[in-house]
Image (spheres, helix red, strand yellow):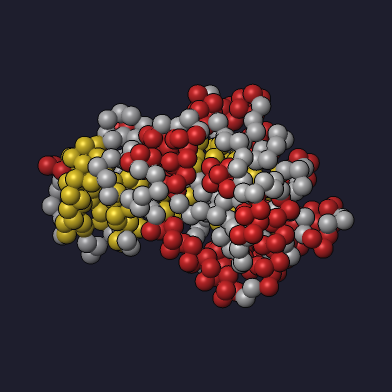
Amino acid sequence: MTSSTVITNIAALVTNDPSLGDNSPLGLVRDAAVVIEGDRIAWTGESSKAPATDNRVDAAGRAMIPGFVDSHSHLVFAGDRTEEFNARMSGRAYSAGGIRTTVAATRAATDAELEANLTRHLAEALRQGTTTFETKSGYGLTVEDEARALRIAARHTEEVTYLGAHIVAPELADDPAAYVALVTGEMLDACAPHARWIDVFCEKGAFDGDQARAILTAGKARGLHPRIHANQLSYGPGVQLAVELDAASADHCTHLTDADVDALASGRTVATLLPGAEFSTRAQWPDARRLLDAGVTVALSTDCNPGSSYTSSVPFCIALAVRDMGMTPDEAVWSATAGGAAALRRTDIGRIGPGARADLVLLDAPSHVHLAYRPGVPLVAGVWRRGVREV
Ligand code: NIG
Ligand code: FE
C-alpha cells in the first residue's frame, strides 16, 4: 500500500488550476493543505477540510508552489568559459562561435566526467526548486559525441533534445551542406532513439531558415518533435518556422517583429524566454509584456549552459523577468511552472491538483511573490519530487 502525507498550514498555495482556487490563473488557495499519495497529488483544498492521512507535515504558514519546470538547458558539457564571460563584461560581444570552446572540452571528456558534471548541476537546480528539466546535446557535433550526450542525459530526464544543429562542426566549417547532411542522416539515426525532441540554433553564424526547416523536418519524420532556438541575437525566420512546424516552443524570442508575435498568438507554439542569457550577454531583454498582451503562452527557463547563461536558478530568472521584462510576479511564477510544462507539452507537471505528479516546492516565505521581491535570497525550504522529499 502506498502511504499518504498531508502538508498542512500552507499560507498560500499556487495550484495553477483556477478551478481549485481563487479563479486566477495561479488558482491560489489560502490556508491550504496538499495530500500526497505515492508519487501523485491526491487532494488540495483548505487545511480545515483535509482528509486523514498516514503522515503529516506542518508548512508553518509558508507558501507552496509546483516544482519548477526548466524546459531549456544545455547540461551535457565539460569545461567552463569564465574568460569569455570576463571579456564580455569588458565590452566584447557574444557570438555563436564561443560554442566551439565547449565542443572541444566536451569531446575531450570521458563519459564519467560528463555525467558527474550533469549530476552536479542537477543537484544545484533541485536545491533551487527545479523538479523537471529538459536538456540537450549540442557540444559533441560528431555522430558518437552527440549520441553519447543523449544517452547520458536520458539516464536523468525523459525530456531529452537532439541539438546536433547547434553550430556547424568545426571540421566541416567550410562545408555546411555536408554537416546538415550528417545531422539529418547518420547522426539522426544514432540520436533519434535517445531523444524526444529535435532543436536547431537558427541564427546568423549557426543555421539559416532553410537549413533549420530541413533538419527539423527530417527529425519529425523520425518521430522527434521540434523546438527551436529562435530570434536570440537578431531578427530571423526561426519564430515563424517554429509556428509553421508546430514546434512545442520557440526559445529566446528576443528580437521579434509584429508578424512573429502574431504567428505565436495564432499557433500552439510556446514562447520560452531565457533572461539568464540576456543577463550574461548584456543584451536587450525579451519583451514578455508584448507577448502576454498578444495572448501568447510564455515559459520562463534558465538556458543553463557554460557560454551564454551559466545559471541553474529559476528564481533568479523570475526576478529578472519581473524587474526587466514586464511580467507580474504571478505571471513569472506561472511561466516557470505551468508555462514550462506547456513548452514540454506535459499536463502531469507544473500544477498542484489531483492526479498531478507530486512535485512541490515549499518556500521560506509567506507568498510566491517573494521570489521576485527578495531576489538572490535562497527561499527554497523544501522540495518533493514524485512524492519524495529531496530537500
Ligand atoms: O541557448 N543559443 C545557442 N545556444 C546557447 C548558447 C550556447 C553557448 O554559448 O555555449 C543558448 O544561449
Ligand atoms: Fe539554449
Find residue 259 and report its horizontal and vertical position in percent: 66, 25
Query: In the picture shown, does residue 148 fall above or below 53?
Result: below
Name the residue rendered at 28%, 40% in the picture. Answer: 367
Name the residue rendered at 53%, 68% in the picture. Answer: 117
Query: In the picture shown, does residue 176 fall above or below 80?
Result: above
Name the residue rendered at 35%, 39% in the picture. Answer: 373
Query: If the image is split into quadrants, where does the N terminus sit?
Result: bottom left
- 86, 314: nearer the viewer: 86
Query: In the picture shown, does residue 223 fall above or below 297?
Result: below
Residue 150 in view (yes/no): no
Find residue 162 and report its horizontal and vertical position in percent: 64, 56
Residue 302 in view (yes/no): yes
Q: Is residue 383 left or right of residue 300?
A: left
Query: If the image is split into quadrants, where does the C terminus sit?
Result: bottom left
Q: How many marks?
A: 0
Find residue 154 and report its horizontal and vertical position in percent: 54, 64
Name the residue rendered at 44%, 35% in the picture. Answer: 322
- 217, 5: nearer the viewer: 5
Find residue 210 and report its horizontal and vertical position in percent: 78, 41
- 83, 292: nearer the viewer: 83
